[in-house]
Image (spheres, helix red, strand yellow):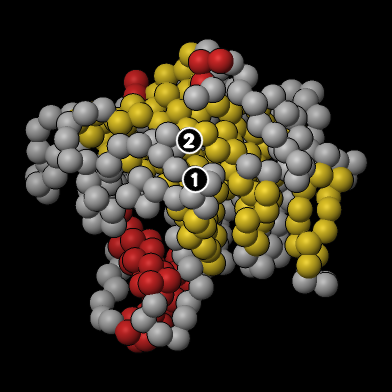
Amino acid sequence: MNANPFNLNYKCEPRNEAVRPRHLAALSQDNTQEGQKFLRIASRRSEKKGYRLVGKGSSSRHVALVAAALLVFLAFSGTGYGAALVRSEPAPSQALTMDADKGNMKSVKASQAKSLVFAEEFDAISWGSRWSGSRSSAYEDGLRNPKDGKLDELSSSSVTAANGVATFTAKPSGGTTLSGWSPWTTGLLTTEGTAENFQVIPGDIIEARVRLPESRGAWPALWTWKDGGNEVDIFEYHPDNPDMLELSNGVKPSGVDHRDPNVVSPGKWITVGVHFESHSNNWFLNGKNVYSDSRGVGAEWSAHLILNLSVSAGKWHPAPDDANPISFLVDYVRVWR
């Protein structure tokens, strides 16, 4: 495996033969697709806090912006973090970051204090110490999240690890809830509520290698969460948009729907990451910088990691059209600091 994930000449090889073969957009002045997407995201976030956004057009976008700003403000109630150096693997020899003074890209060398502080290779899942899979504060009642358009019912048994690969499996759980939806048991890993309590902070670089699912209704994501917000989506994916990754910053609203049919498609392995910075976050796909938000997360930001497979309820994207299990594979998650 190449230990230099952000080198522009990066070539990714799997660690074993068995594995070889996630909204906010810039707010516009008209009723564009990006503007409507911003409204959907703001609506989802505000509903979790007991608000409801209504209306159409510019006034609705204004309400969404105010609601999102309020939620971000409420999220900044804690900035503590904990981490431990876990492996003596070299840091990336080069990454791209935004030069805030000149507005262009510059190189960051490994000598600038980038050490591997989190390395999950999925030889096994360290429940309780590193990962929790039974509850998340990002979910409405800790286990389910129907207001976010998800059929999820979390179960730690839905995540397994073997041969250096984590497999997330979603299956119909049977029955119907009082709200009328049919839940699917599915998997989520979060560093929240664990002994390590690992959190990412400004300056960190995170990278994961994942296999994009093919099944209708699949909704995999790697993202951050803390205190009701602090969300940055390293990626979200929906097979109904087969060549698109959703990359977004919910702390200082910005984002892009990145399309690349040559790299992003159902069933493909991709390497995706973010360099979190106070003034600009920078997203990478297979070693190439694909988006810089010029917003960043601020100097005091910190957040837990969430890696999960959700199942769409049809609110934002199509729901499953059969009861066949849905799977999502992850090779590794690494963080340099």
Callout 2: SS: loop
Q: Position of residue 175 (x, y in %)?
A: 9, 33
Which of 129/311 is in front?
A: 311
The label number, if any, that marks residue 120 in the structure image: none
Give the residue furthest to the top.
163
Q: Position of residue 36 (x, y in %)?
A: 36, 72
Q: Position of residue 274 (x, y in %)?
A: 64, 49
Is residue 68 visible in this depiction of the protein?
yes
Give the residue furthest to the right.
111
Is residue 133 visible in this depiction of the protein?
no
Tell me what residue is drawn at x 45 percent, y 28 percent: 329
Inspect the image, locate mark 1, and give the three-letter code of the amino acid beneath it. Val
Classify 10 Å Cα crowding around label 2: few (below 14), some (14-19), many (20 and above). some
Q: Quadrant of the N terminus?
A: top right
Classify 10 Å Cα crowding around label 1: few (below 14), some (14-19), many (20 and above). many
Callout 1: SS: loop
Quarter of image, res 295: bottom right
Q: Quadrant of the C terminus?
A: top right
Quarter of image, res 120: top right
Identify residue for label 2. 268
Q: Is residue 34 above or below residue 76?
A: below
Inspect the image, locate mark 2, and give the three-letter code of the amino acid beneath it. Lys
Q: Is residue 34 above or below residue 174?
A: below
Question: Label 1, label 2: how many angstroms apart (C-alpha)?
Answer: 7 Å
Which of 80/229 is in front?
A: 229
Tell me what residue is drawn at x 81 percent, y 29 percent: 90
Identify residue for label 1. 264
